[in-house]
Amino acid sequence: MAEGSGEVSLAELETAFRKFAVYGDTKATGNEMNGKNFVKLCKDCKVIDGKNVTSTDVDIVFSKVKVKSARVITFEQFTQAMAELATKRFKGKSQEEAVQLLYGLIAGKEPGNFGVTKVAKASAVDRLTDSSKFTGSHKERFDASGKGKGRVGREDIPDTSGYVSTYKGQGTYDSKIKEDK
């Protein structure tokens, strides 16, 4: 942007055009823009003001400048569309002045992620995953710190020591044999 003159170069405008052209499409090259991204550019850069220029106006202008069989516009067609929208957006200004004001709105802008779904409140998830509140058999699967016990917590591993499970003197047989000798 030239200092003090308020004029925007076409290179800055083309940079913004390319950024919006590839938005949301992994196969896009940035040379052509579809209608959805054209409307997004107009909304994000405040070309659509809701009074003079609406999204319907933007769709109509897009349809006017594109080739009949095409679904996309090139940068040259984009500049034609901006010239048409400039007179609607800035009524009472000359064509050249209105176009420069409109270019000023667009230059240097990038597509933003407005209205994107946010992560749900974590309190519900925290409550469901707090192992200190578990009851029954699920409580046995975690130690006091909340760390899982692994296989030991999931399965009843049989005691293969040879003793009955409630026998209190487990492991004392060898010492009793030695005492008797």
Image (cartoon, rainbow, N blue to C red):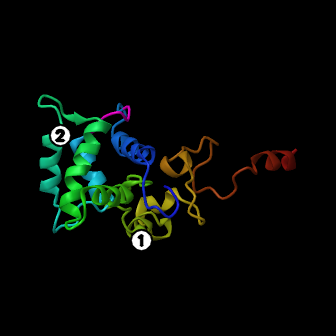
Residue 1: x and y in percent read 49, 55
Question: Who's the residue at 28% across and 52% down the image?
Answer: 40
Numbered label attached to residue 123: 1
Place residue 148 in its image quadrant: bottom right
User: Tag on residue 65?
Assistant: 2
Residue 32 forms part of the magenta stretch: yes
Magenta residue span: 29-33
Disc 2 versus disc 1: nearer the observer? 2
As helix, strand or loop, the secondary structure at mark 1 comes to helix
Residue at 41 percent across and 52 percent down: it is: 110
Majority secondary structure in the magenta region: loop
Q: Is residue 149 left or right of residue 82?
A: right
Classify 10 Å Cα crowding around label 1: few (below 14), some (14-19), many (20 and above): few
Residue at screen point 39% across, 41% down: 18
- Tell me the kind of residue under disc 2: Val
Residue at 29% across, 35% down:
74
Q: Nearer the viewer, residue 36 or 61?
A: 61
In the picture as drawn, the residue positioned furthest to the top comes out as 69
Q: Is residue 136 magenta?
A: no
Q: In this orientation, which residue lies closer to the viewer: 138 or 85?
A: 85
Q: Does residue 11 sit above or below 5 in this rendering?
A: above
Q: Closer to the N terminus: mark 2 or mark 1?
A: 2
Expressed as whole percent of the image width and height from the top left, the position of residue 47 reads 27, 60
Q: Is residue 179 left or right of residue 40?
A: right
Q: Quadrant of the C terminus?
A: top right
Amino acid type, residue under disc 1 in the picture: Ser
Determine the CA span between mark 2 and mark 1.
Answer: 51 Å
**Position in image of residue 33 (x %, y %):** 29, 39
